[in-house]
Image (spheres, grey):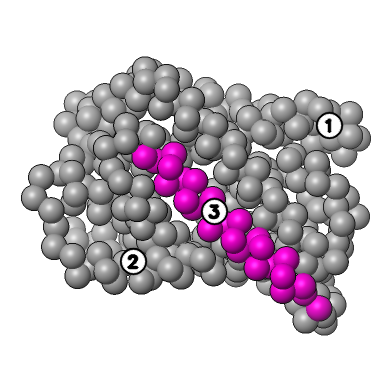
Amino acid sequence: MSGKGNSLKKIALVALKALVSGILLTYLFRKIDLRTMIEHFRDMNGWYFTLSSLASLCTIFLASLRWRALLSGSQPISKLFSLNLIGSFFNNFLPGAVGGDAVKAYYLYREIGQGGRSIASVFMDRYMGYTGLLTIGLISGAIAFNDLRAVGMQWITPLLFAAFLGGSLLVFGLRIGRRFSTVADFYDYFHGTLRNRRAILAAYGLSLLIQLLTILSIYLITLAVGQRPQFTALFVFVPIIVTVMMLPISISGLGLRESAFVVLFGLVGISAEASTTISILWFLSIAAPSLIGLVEYARYKRTPAATP
């Protein structure tokens, strides 16, 4: 009965997230001119979209290099790149199924036979990525403090950074759940990796580069639909948009992402129709290269598990 109960809970959670996404999108589409949005899609510059997709593929490869650094080089880059493509595919095309990070952790565990280390390395990879994102947001927010103050947004990135730092100190300082062996392994890996300065610096540097490419990817999409926002404004907007998308209340950030684009891009004079188009096209530019993950997933499904 417990298994059936867990399945029902998962179904209910996915249904609730789908409801939130549906409500947000319905509200948004009722406020915008759909014909104008369709015209933006029709007039899109395909070359900019292609370049944005290539930038997204590059971020997946760089994330694989970061993951390898956090694993102390113990796994080949080809394997980690493949697993990241699979994770990206699950995140973008199967949002109601198993999460992409869970799939990555599972296949890494299948290779090394260490559950705590596998889960912790995936988490640490995400953790370093978000650290890099907030760093860019914090520095950009400080530079554009007066402009942000004019619209009442000057404290958003500092508050995000403070909340992230406070949460990190609370969870990893208290080591919540450390009595469980897998959780204990998780904390041991996390604290051990933090002491590896070379790995941390490499991961942090790659995180900054990944975030810069992400910003470039969105900028290319804005050019694809004929918009010319200040490139520097995206350094402030993107960390906020990604943080909003990470809230676990919708399907893969659907609805939250579009709403965040409309609100923030509206501050620099981009219409709601163009902002929504940019949001959707950015998602598609990320989803397109992740289709390679379907091929990799099929290959992994046929590969027997390694004996640790």
Q: Position of residue 244 (x, y in %)?
A: 62, 48
First-in-chain label (3 vs 2): 3
Instruction: Name the residue carrying label 2.
Output: 296
Instruction: Name the residue carrying label 3.
Output: 58
Instruction: Name the residue carrying label 1.
Output: 144
Query: Which residue is drawn at the image coordinates 10% and 45% (left, top)?
Result: 308
In 3D space, how far apart are the residues under numbered discs 3 and 1 (Cα atoms)? 28 Å
Q: Quadrant of the N terminus?
A: bottom left
Give, as a single range, the part of the protein colored magenta: 43-68
Disc 2 element: helix
Q: Position of residue 207 (x, y in %)?
A: 54, 37
Query: Which residue is drawn at the image coordinates 43% and 42% (left, top)?
Result: 65
Left/right of residue 29 with respect to residue 91 in the rendered view: right
First-in-chain label (3 vs 1): 3
Q: Position of residue 134 (x, y in %)?
A: 62, 33
Left/right of residue 53 with respect to residue 185 in the rendered view: right
Query: Which residue is drawn at the image coordinates 37% and 33% (left, top)?
Result: 70
Disc 3 element: helix
Q: Position of residue 46 (x, y in %)?
A: 72, 74
